[in-house]
């Protein structure tokens, strides 16, 4: 290997290291979701989803920069971080089609690079279903591709594993959970907010609180009820019951790092009538 090539390799590797903290985590500034095809609520929900999934990844140190730019606006390069990786997503409806396009943007101002990766989805709902592993793989793949093309030979070293001590707090519960037949997944964000995504496409905002000195988790529906929140009920019955339904509420006991066991207070059919009561449920963290 000649001296020039060795020098390029060395500079590329040092540049890569500038984005790693002392603990070996990627430093990422997240600037949210930009879309002219989504209303503000949907854009905010999708932005929350991406932020939550990034924060779930142990090797990522994420700073929320969503307040730095206007809604539905693609950030200017001058607005992005000078030292960290800057990340945002642009979502748009494919022209003359029912499909959607989600483009990940990673800007590295130190190396003056702007990396993108576009994925096509059959429906907008499919974007919400994409898991954190797919986001992580896409993110790291972009970085590795850039570094490999710059060095021509150097592969990026694997991200180090980190061990985290489980604590009963909304922060330790942050992540993706599954466990109910008619629910696709539950996302809990740091700070005690989140949302439930049903298999029928509905989404419910939730709040999460820790009680009894950390031994009890209370998850509550926020916002108005929707018939789609009661998929076990016949549709007409659900439409009528949702008009005056109390918020759905879960009460869990923590069972290890990745399991919540408890009851869900919701509506159920009792013959031709609708009753309110508790049913046994279990949520498991999606690893």
Image (spheres, rainbow, N blue to C red):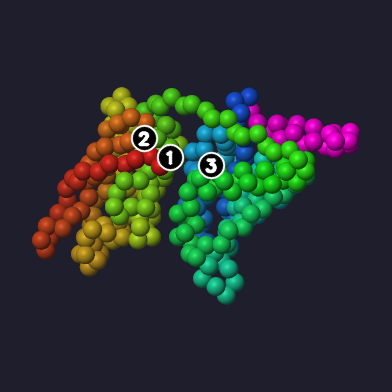
Q: Is there CB contact under 8 Å for labels 3 and 2?
A: no
Q: Which residues are magenta?
A: 1-21
Q: Residue at x 67, y 53 (%)?
A: 116
Residue denoted by label 1:
287
Give neighbour class at mark 3: few <14, some 14-19, many 20+ (Cα, 10 Å): many
Q: Is residue 39 left or right of residue 73?
A: left
Q: Earlier in the sequence, mark 2 or mark 1?
A: 2
Residue denoted by label 2:
258
Q: Which element carries disc 2, helix, strand or loop?
A: loop
| Residue 161 pos. (x, y %) | 54, 30
Q: Which element carries disc 3, helix, strand or loop?
A: helix
Q: Earlier in the sequence, mark 3 or mark 1?
A: 3
Q: Which residue is farthest right?
A: 3
Q: How many marks?
A: 3
The dot on residue 11 is none
Residue mark closest to the camera, 3 vs 2: 2
Q: Is residue 226 left or right of residue 195?
A: left
Q: Which element carries disc 1, helix, strand or loop?
A: loop
Label the magenta part by its dominant secondary structure: helix
From mark 3 to mark 2, how far is it between C-alphas? 18 Å
Q: Residue at x 72, y 42 (%)?
A: 147
The dot on residue 54 is 3
| 18 part of magenta stretch | yes
From mark 3 to mark 1, how far is it between C-alphas? 14 Å
Which of the 4 quarters of the picture holds residue 2?
top right
Q: Is there CB contact under 8 Å for labels 3 and 1?
A: no
Q: Is there CB contact under 8 Å for labels 2 and 1?
A: yes
| Residue 143 pos. (x, y %) | 67, 43
Q: Which residue is farthest bottom?
A: 96
From mark 2 to mark 1, how far is it between C-alphas? 9 Å
């Amino acid at each position: 290997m000649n001296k020039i090539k060795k020098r390029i390799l060395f500079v590329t590797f040092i540049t890569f290291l500038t984005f790693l903290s002392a603990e070996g985590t990627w430093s990422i500034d997240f600037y949210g979701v930009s879309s002219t095809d989504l209303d503000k609520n949907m854009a905010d929900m999708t932005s929350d989803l991406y932020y939550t999934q990034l924060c779930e990844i142990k090797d990522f140190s994420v700073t929320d920069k969503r307040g730095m730019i206007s809604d539905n606006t693609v950030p200017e390069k001058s607005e992005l971080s000078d030292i960290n990786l800057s990340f945002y997503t642009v979502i748009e409806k494919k022209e003359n089609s029912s499909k959607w396009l989600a483009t990940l943007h990673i800007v590295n101002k130190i190396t003056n690079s702007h990396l993108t990766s576009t994925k096509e989805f059959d429906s907008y709902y499919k974007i919400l279903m994409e898991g954190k592993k797919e986001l992580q793989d896409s993110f790291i793949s972009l970085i590795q591709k850039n570094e490999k093309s710059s060095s021509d030979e150097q592969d990026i070293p694997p991200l180090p594993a980190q061990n985290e001590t489980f604590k009963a707090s909304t922060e330790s519960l942050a992540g993706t959970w599954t466990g109910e037949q008619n629910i696709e997944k539950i996302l809990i964000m740091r700070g005690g907010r989140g949302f439930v995504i049903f298999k029928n496409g509905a989404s419910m905002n939730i709040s999460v609180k820790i009680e009894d000195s950390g031994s009890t988790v209370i998850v509550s529906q926020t916002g108005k009820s929707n018939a789609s929140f009661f998929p076990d009920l016949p549709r007409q019955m659900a439409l009528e019951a949702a008009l005056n339904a109390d918020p759905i509420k879960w009460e869990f006991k923590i069972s290890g790092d990745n399991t919540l066991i408890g009851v869900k207070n919701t509506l159920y059919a009792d013959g031709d009538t609708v009753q309110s009561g508790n049913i046994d449920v279990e949520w498991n963290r999606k690893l």
